Amino acid sequence: MFRKILIANRGEIAVRIIRACQEMGIATVAVYSDADAGALHVALADEAVRIGPPPPRDSYLCADCILEAARARGCDAIHPGYGFLAENADFADAVTAAGLTFIGPSGAAMRVMGSKTSARAAMQAAGVPVVPGYQASQTDADLVAAAGELGYPVLVKATAGGGGKGMRVVADPGDLPAALASARREAANAFGDDRIYLEKRILHPHHIEFQVFGDAHGNAVHLFERECSVQRRHQKIVEESPSPLLDDALRRRMGEAAVAAVKAVGYTNAGTLEFLVEGLSGAIDGMLSFYFLEMNTRLQVEHPVTEAVTGIDLVKLQIRVAAGEPIPFTQADIRQRGHAIECRIYAEDPANGFLPAIGSVLAAVEPVGPGVRVDAGVTSGDTVTLHYDPMIAKLIVLGEGRADAIGKMLWALRHYVILGDVVTNIPFLRDVLAHPRFAAGDTTTDFVDECFAAWQPAAFTPPDLAFAVAALAEVLSAGSGVAASDLDATGDPTSPWQQANSFRMGTGAR
């Protein structure tokens, strides 16, 4: 087993990996940019190394900086988390070449499955259905011609992409050239790769993914599905398991396809096969069709959903498999128990196009109760900056059934208190969970656009805890001699921190 692991990431996923390592008796090394010097993951790790200024290209995307930190601190493995360098095959190879273990798939498998276009080809060869698309050429003329043959609407997607970055929906042929240019720019900035491809847009689908694992001993399993159809700007915000759409027969077919994909490319460690499933309106003779969308060659943001319903710690399993151990169970051993839901808590303004909302978090009080879990990367006293993804935390609940899980999540959202100069999406998430279509499981990928396009927060009475925390924060700031203006991260004279009567509660109305 490894002695010391460097976590090449930040935020809640770095915290999650550090805690798993601590439970396994493995020493940890955090890396941080100047913007994260006081971050939670830095405080929790056994050691921490500064790797550069705030821009990701100069810090968390700097492979040489991270490798040097790992060598200097005597690490024998690197865990990439998700995002940044997690799906960079060259980085995985560089880690191996440096004599360290990359906790993830090989660079070769990553090149096949991490590239959306080569993954499509591999899945077609393995007999897994794929969404009709075009990937043969990068010229605008060929892409425009291909879009006409596929039929509009089409999706422009980044070859190296994920998380909705580099993706554009194009319904009108006249809009395609501009969409190609903007998708290339975003893909180059996010992934260092501006290649794109086209897919036919499947109308009103469910987005369902299967968690998979492979090891170096030839074993491969799936750990069932996650329904991820509640999305904004092509990025998931609510995930659940089991999917309310799948019956046992379709679940079995999709699981078998996922395992076949893993075996076809000799994939090892954690991965996720994402599928589009036509809604009930698209069923033929009562059978729903599914199409391979892409594979994420890393741990997913929403992995706690799977952990909740299977009881399997995926981060620890990643580490054990990377250390050469076989997967310690068979497919028949894995069971889904209960119903889990995850909500992503973001510093963003849903009433203003989900724009990121940078600012300070004076106090954050997480809900506590049976079946409630919070994976947080931001805590009291932290600042949400413009440099990175504005996720504050992931809120996960486990209920006996779906209705129980929905009720538990609504309770937890009501009791998640975030105070400070920052807007959160908590009020929006409450309305999503309370919507009749969500209760019915009718959450296709256009659910948010169809039901919340003109959303505004309703009046909300915070729990008594919010007022107690606000009062405590005021007392503590007064006792420390810190003025409200000192807590303002923006310097804006109109900031709530500059106005005593404008204190904002992240759980309340705007």
Image (cartoon, helix red, strand yellow):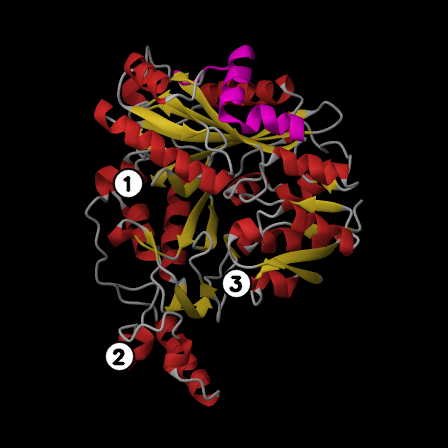
The answer to which quarter of the image holds residue 347 is bottom left
**Closest to the observer: 30 or 138?**
138
- Amino acid type shown at disc 2: Asn
What main secondary structure does the magenta stretch of the protein show?
Answer: helix
Q: In whole angstroms, how far apart are the C-alphas of marks 3 and 1?
A: 33 Å
**Which residue carries the number 2 mark?**
501
Please tell me which of labels 2 and 1 falls first in the chain: 1
Q: Does the segment drawn in magenta span residue 126?
A: yes
Task: Identify the residue at image location x=22%, y=41%.
Answer: 451
**Residue 256 seen:** yes
Verify whether residue 424 appears in magenta: no
Marks 2/1: CA–CA distance: 33 Å
Q: Residue at 70%, 46% (x, y): give it.
A: 78
- Helix, strand or loop at label 3? It is helix
Residue 346 locus on image (x, y percent): 40, 54
Q: In the image, which residues are magenta?
A: 107-132
Q: Tell me the distance, in whole angstroms, between the alpha carbons under discs 2 and 3.
A: 29 Å
Mark 2 neighbour density, 10 Å: few (under 14) some (14–19) many (20 or more)? few
**Residue 43, percent from left and from top:** 62, 66
The secondary element bearing badge 2 is classed as: helix
Residue holding disc 3: 35
Q: How many marks?
A: 3
Mark 1, residue position? 448
Which is nearer the eye, 136 or 280? 136
Residue type at numbered disc 1: Val
Q: Amino acid at mark 3?
A: Ala
